[in-house]
Amino acid sequence: MSLNLSGADLSVHPRTTAGQHLSLIAGVLLIVLGVAGFAVSGFSNWTGGTLEQQVIGFAVNPLSSAMHVVLGVLGLLGRTGARRARWYGIVLFLAGAGLFAYAALDGGAPLNLNWPISTLHAVFACLGLLIAFVPVRTGRRRSTAELD
């Protein structure tokens, strides 16, 4: 800890970045979707399922629910540091864009993908880009006494 003449603490405190906040939000949403998906589809027939197995319009099966939970946990871990949040943004982008492209090209048969969930994956891919490339300010804010 470093002090100036007035006794104020001038040490640099780490700040929570916007990417970390977005990582937390994405993580919580994905965990909720994954847990609700398991509640609807159960734990058997991992790549099966019908389009009638839905959580608020999003088709689910155990495999897609597991992927949502894993991405959600990674989002919660991304909240713990700015660099982790950036990496999470990259992973979220790759996963979301890959799942969207897979559904567009193949119809999403093994993962039980419908257009609403594919659109949600595209939204998460865009959110991943935002998390990965949101500007990060480092250091401490200068007090008004230090301004020139």
Image (cartoon, rainbow, N blue to C red):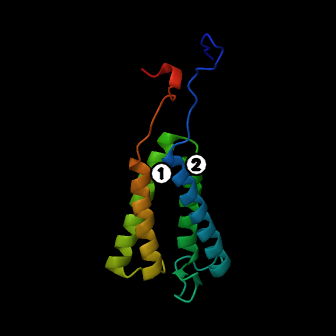
- Which disc, if any, is residue 31? none
How far across and how far down the image is residue 4, in percent? Answer: 59, 13
Residue 80 figure quarter: top right
Label 2: element kind? helix
Amino acid type, label 1: Tyr
Label 1: element kind? helix
How far across and how far down the image is residue 30, in percent? Answer: 57, 65
Q: In the image, is residue 73 above or below residue 62?
A: above
- Number of residue marks: 2
Q: Identify which residue is drawn at 42% across, 81% down.
A: 115
Q: Identify which residue is drawn at 57% across, 58% down.
A: 25
How far across and how far down the image is residue 15, in percent? Answer: 55, 37
Viewer-side residue, 16 vs 122 = 16
Q: In the image, is residue 100 above or below residue 125?
A: below
- Which disc, if any, is residue 88? 1
User: From the viewer's perspective, is 50 left or right of 1?
Assistant: left
The quarter in which the N terminus is drawn is: top right
Q: Are marks 1 and 2 in contact (CB under 8 Å)?
A: yes
Q: Is residue 73 visible?
A: yes
Q: Is residue 113 visible?
A: no
Mark 1 neighbour class, 10 Å CA radius: few under 14, some 14 to 19, many 20 or more: many
Q: Identify which residue is drawn at 55% across, 50% down.
A: 21
Q: CA distance from mark 1 to mark 2?
A: 8 Å
Q: Identify which residue is drawn at 64% across, 74% down.
A: 36
Residue 40 figure quarter: bottom right
Mark 2 neighbour class, 10 Å CA radius: few under 14, some 14 to 19, many 20 or more: some
Q: In the image, is residue 144 above or below residue 135?
A: above
The quarter in which the C terminus is drawn is: top left
Amino acid type, label 2: Leu
How far across and how far down the image is residue 129, in percent? Answer: 39, 55
